[in-house]
Image (tube, rainbow, N blue to C red):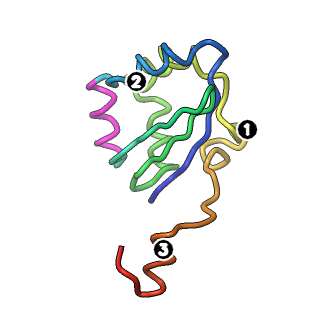
Amino acid sequence: MIVALHSVLHEGAEEQYDRDHQRIPADLEASFARLGIHEWSIWRSGRNLFHLVDCDDWLGATKALEDDPANLAWQAHIGRHVAYFVGEEGGAAGQVLPHVYSLRAQRSADGAAD
């Protein structure tokens, strides 16, 4: 499954957030692999972050990460930069952006090659 998320940085945290994401800790990467998170890409526009996550089960993975030592350490570190996730009041499910359109899906439905 592909999950899209939107979060917002605190003002002035952009450069440090980018530096901190040059490489995530190996133990967090291992936790992601164990929990079926295959890819996590982040794009930034100003203070706005757009995440695209390819995972087996988003709700299951986020639930498991709540008590994961590697994730807790990472959140304590990186969380100082993040003001909030859009929809966070609804928990992990509320953070997921609804999928609206895919050119690839349209082409596939029309029988066109990628």
Are there few (<14), some (14-19), or many (20+) residues within 10 Å of tag 1? few
Badge 2, how many Cα within 10 Å: few under 14, some, many 20+?
Answer: few
> The disc labelled 2 sits on which kind of residue?
His
Q: Earlier in the sequence, mark 1 or mark 3?
A: 1
Q: In the rendered image of this protein, does residue 73 appear above or below residue 40?
A: above
Question: Which residue is at a point 60% across and 44% down the rendered structure image?
Answer: 92
Q: Is residue 4 above or below residue 70?
A: below
95 w.r.t. 68: above or below: below
**Picture quadrant of residue 80:** top right
* Discs 1/3, front: 3
Asked whether, in this view, residue 86 is left or right of residue 29, the answer is right
Residue 83 falls in image quadrant: top right
Q: Total number of numbered labels?
A: 3
Alpha carbon distance from label 2 to label 3: 31 Å
**Residue 42 belongs to the span the image colors magenta:** no
| Dot 2 or dot 1, earlier in sequence | 2
At numbered mark 1, what does the secondary structure look like: helix, strand or loop?
A: helix
Residues drawn in magenta: 26-35
Q: Residue at x 43, y 80 (%)?
A: 108
The residue tagged 1 is: 89
Picture quarter with the N terminus = bottom left
- The circle on residue 105 is 3
Task: State if disc 3 and disc 1 touch (CB < 8 Å).
Answer: no
Q: Amino acid at mark 1?
A: Glu
The C terminus: image quadrant? bottom left
Above or below — where is 80 with respect to 66?
above
Q: Which residue is mark 2?
A: 21
User: Which mark's residue is nearer the viewer, 2 or 1?
Assistant: 2
Of callouts 2 and 3, which one flags the residue occurring earlier in the amino acid sequence?
2
